[in-house]
Image (tube, grey):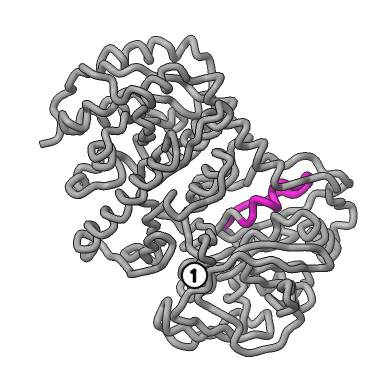
Amino acid sequence: MIGGLLIAGTTSDAGKSVLTAGICRWLHRRHVRVAPYKAQNMSNNSVVVVTPDGRGGEIGRAQAMQAAACGIAPDLRFNPVLLKPGSDRSSQVVLLGEAVDTVTAGNYRTLRPRLAETAHAALEDLRTDYDVVICEGAGSPTEINLRDGDFVNMGLARRFGLPTVVVGDIDRGGVFAAFFGTLALLSREDQDLVSAFVINKFRGDLGILRPGLDMITAATGRPVHGVLPFDLDVWLDAEDSLAYGRVLGRPGPPRGTAWLRVAVIRVPRISNATDAEALAAEPGVQVRLTVEPAEIADADLVVIPGSKATVSDLAWLRETGLAEAISVHAAAGKPLLGICGGFQMLAGSIHDEVESGRGTVPGLGLLPVEITFAARKTLARSSGSAMGAPAHGYEIHHGYVSAGTPEPLLRYDDGRPEGAVAGNVFGTHWHGAFESDEFRRRFLTEAARLAGRHGFEVAPDTRYAQVRERALDVLGDLVEEHLDTGALLRLIEKGPTPGLPFLPPGAP
């Protein structure tokens, strides 16, 4: 058994992450020892993994979701290189879970050999522990300006002889042109590994599409191994906040007589936007991502999420008028929640010589704390209680509360305070805390009271872990029902299809 497959995409957000997760869940159901892998991920949605020696490290949230699809715990090897953008020109480099450097377009080439060596070693190690490793590419495999030294897409496939399936999003249009162009711009050696295509997010009559499937196969020599339908239940654990659209999930009807309207501010360097997903899983809770002050005015609960660039995104809030809208919302007594970077923005002042280097800047002044940035990042899995209910989460932050003794929102198991509450304003550094079902219910009940939504009632039976498992089962079902799974197994077991035709012009 070759024990591997690369899922590449015609573009970012073509469906690589969900297809990888779906294949992983399908193989897991077949009792295959399977693991996910993404050599290099660029995302500010990450999760903390605790290693056997107790060290905390970060991997992309999508790879943690894929691990759950495999029925295994997250592992730093699943995403050995994580780039966390802090601006349009620089990213923090997280290598096997630990922040080691800052990369720019100028110094990436210098750093790349070290990243590639670590990524290759991680995959080699995984292949000794698992029967199959389903690898996810990044962006497009036809980024011809980056092919030299690539270790994420076709460079990875070449190194390990991985059969490659290219997925395209038909919802964007031009999927056949994208398949043809992707293949035609690859070198002969890379084309030899591209064995099939998959179409994602199809809506409509498959009979009308079928002639196009036959034509792209005739034009390229590669079959289409299936057409995945658009499914509204596939929305959890997005790799990038841009994948969400404006409304999260499919909110069920309210249990009471009123909806609770939640506005999550899409700051430019938003991180762990997935925190809002637990709120969106609740019936009667509409969660909308927004950059519009008018939508803040209409919201019951406003959430400022995490940020990879707290000081910069705080300045953006002021420039766009959102800061004023947030202050008006809070002054009206309506609930306001800040998570991690969003919590830090609510402070009276922020002292940052680490992330932005701007020194002391004023915060929004809505919580009685001061924040100072430490050089060493806090990475931890955390548990305790909040509002009288058990709570758990994870922490990824440089900033910490350096002054102020507010009423805490949470307490660790050992009794230490965490976060802050000042009337209708709440803040915490914990990501994932609202996945704790009883805490989420109590918080939403209080938020509805503060917002005057007296007809809103929380659902007593929503279990977020079950919501996520159902979503993973949906992905497994989609793969089993709509893909040629026999053909996928042949690729995994026997490797790339031999004798595939070359499509000119090819890369030089």
Residue 368 drawn at (x, y percent): 68, 85
Image location (x, y in percent) of residue 489: 42, 22
- Tell me where residue 25 appears, x and y as whole percent: 55, 33
Element assignment for label 1:
helix
Residue 292 at least partly seen: yes
Which part of the image, by quadrant, shows the N terminus?
top left
State which quadrant residue 369 falls in.
bottom right
The residue under the point 59% across, 69% down is 340
Q: Is residue 383 above or below residue 262?
A: below
Amino acid residing under circle 1: Asp
Q: Describe residue 11's horizontal placement relative to residue 113 as left or right.
A: right
Q: Was residue 284 drawn as part of the magenta stretch in this picture? A: yes
Q: Measured along the vertical axis of the image, is residue 71 above or below residue 329?
A: above
Q: Residue at x 63, y 37 (%)?
A: 471
Quarter-wise, where is residue 283 in the image?
A: top right
**Residue in front for this viewpoint, 494 or 445:** 494
Residue interval drawn in magenta: 275-291
Of 289 and 484, the residue lying toward us: 484
Q: Is residue 425 visible?
A: no
Q: Is residue 174 above or below residue 97?
A: above
Which image quarter is the C terminus in? top left
Q: How many marks?
A: 1
